Image: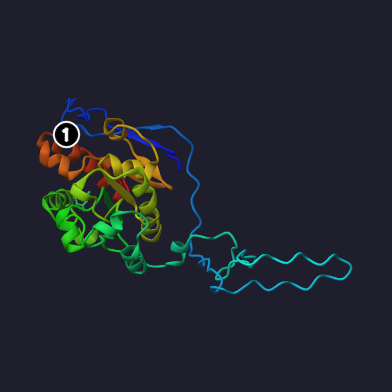
């Protein structure tokens, strides 16, 4: 994944280390560019790759005249072309799912990592399937695990307030996480869990096609941008996720611990709102 960054650099901001460089009144971004533009992925779903029926050996083709007969294919080796689509190499079954709702049972049945076994409920995400703003957090917590809904605990209440402050109702946006299942004791996501779960997030974003993405916290930014930078380095810029403007800000749970980060968060989300409104990026 490529960063392909077009950056609106906010000149006066509080950095991740908490040092304040100015007030929120002057969040007037200047534009710098770096990185090469990302290649957009083609739209449209492809058929899934279906395995051949169990136990059925592939049919051997009749040898063409004048050619040596083909060697028999050992049992267990699949020689048939994948069925279900016109693209032989479209092996991603998620691409066959054309709606967000279609992803829900797939996520719920997922056992690609250990979290699928330890969680109570999967938390796929919720909101407007045609939302112009998608909010991406890290992973469900205890309340989310109990309810199957994203951001409904204390951090969720704060997220609601943040959204309200920039003129959104919760139902108007789409809210989800990198991980769809709760890590035990709310520990940090492990890289293999992120790798296993990220395709669901990518497909959700592909289906929604928002105008702007708000990544809350480092794990969300890392999963979407594929870069391992500090929050301080990631904030104050407009990144690109497959061509879609992406803003990085603090996670609401971090704001509960450090309320003085609310001011820079306010700067960030106002930029997201401006992009949503078609002003900038
Ligand atoms: N924190 C997250 O990152 N996501 C939630 O859904 C809840 C808390």
Q: Position of residue 44 (x, y in %)?
A: 48, 63
Relative vertical location of residue 188 with respect to residue 64 in this rendering, above or below: above
Q: Is mark 1 within 8 Å of ligand 1?
A: no
Instruction: Classify the position of the C terminus by image quarter.
Output: top left
Relative vertical location of residue 250 with respect to residue 174 in this rendering, above or below: above
Q: Residue furthest front?
A: 75
User: Residue at coordinates 40% horizontally, 40% vertically from top-left?
Assistant: 226
Left or right: residue 66 versus residue 76 is right
Residue beneath label 1, please?
25
Residue placed most toward the observer, 217 or 237: 217
**In which quadrant of the rendered view does residue 90 lie?**
bottom right
Which coloring applies here?
rainbow
**In which quadrant of the rendered view does residue 202 lie?**
bottom left
Q: Position of residue 141 (x, y in %)?
A: 18, 52
Bin the neighbour count of mark 1 within 10 Å (Cα to Cα): few under 14, some 14-19, many 20 and up. few
Q: Position of residue 66 (x, y in %)?
A: 89, 67
Residue placed most toward the observer, 96 or 131: 96
User: Residue at coordinates 53% horizontally, 73% vertically from top-left?
Assistant: 54
Q: Residue furthest right?
A: 66
Callout 1: helix, strand or loop? helix
Can residue 41 be seen in the rendering of this structure?
Answer: yes
Relative vertical location of residue 119 with respect to residue 69 in this rendering, above or below: above
**In which quadrant of the rendered view does residue 77 lie?**
bottom right
Instruction: Classify the position of the N terminus by image quarter.
Output: top left
Residue placed most toward the observer, 113 or 126: 113
Q: Position of residue 99 (x, y in %)?
A: 38, 67
Can residue 174 be seen in the rendering of this structure?
Answer: no
């Amino acid at each position: 994944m490529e960063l392909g960054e077009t950056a609106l650099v906010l000149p006066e901001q509080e950095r991740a280390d908490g040092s304040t460089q100015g007030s929120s009144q002057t969040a007037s971004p200047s534009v710098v560019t770096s990185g090469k533009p990302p290649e957009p992925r083609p739209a449209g779903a492809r058929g899934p790759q279906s395995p051949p029926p169990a136990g059925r050996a592939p049919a051997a083709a009749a040898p063409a005249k004048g050619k040596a007969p083909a060697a028999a294919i050992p049992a267990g080796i699949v020689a048939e072309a994948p069925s279900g689509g016109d693209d032989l190499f479209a092996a991603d079954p998620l691409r066959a799912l054309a709606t967000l709702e279609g992803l829900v049972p797939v996520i719920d049945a997922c056992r690609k990592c250990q979290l699928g076994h330890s969680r109570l409920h999967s938390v796929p995400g919720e909101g407007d399937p045609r939302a112009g703003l998608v909010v991406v957090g890290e992973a469900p917590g205890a309340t989310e695990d109990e309810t199957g809904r994203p951001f409904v605990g204390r951090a969720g209440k704060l997220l609601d307030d943040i959204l309200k402050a920039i003129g959104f109702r919760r139902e108007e946006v789409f809210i989800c996480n990198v991980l769809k299942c709760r890590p035990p004791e709310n520990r940090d996501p492990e890289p293999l869990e992120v790798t296993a779960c990220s395709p669901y997030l990518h497909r959700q974003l592909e289906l929604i096609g928002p105008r702007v993405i708000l990544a809350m916290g480092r794990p969300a930014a890392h999963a979407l941008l594929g870069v391992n930078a500090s929050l301080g380095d990631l904030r104050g810029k407009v990144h690109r996720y497959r061509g879609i403007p992406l803003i990085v800000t603090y996670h609401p749970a971090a704001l509960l611990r450090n309320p003085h980060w609310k001011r820079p968060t306010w700067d960030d989300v106002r930029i997201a709102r401006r992009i949503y409104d078609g002003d900038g990026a």
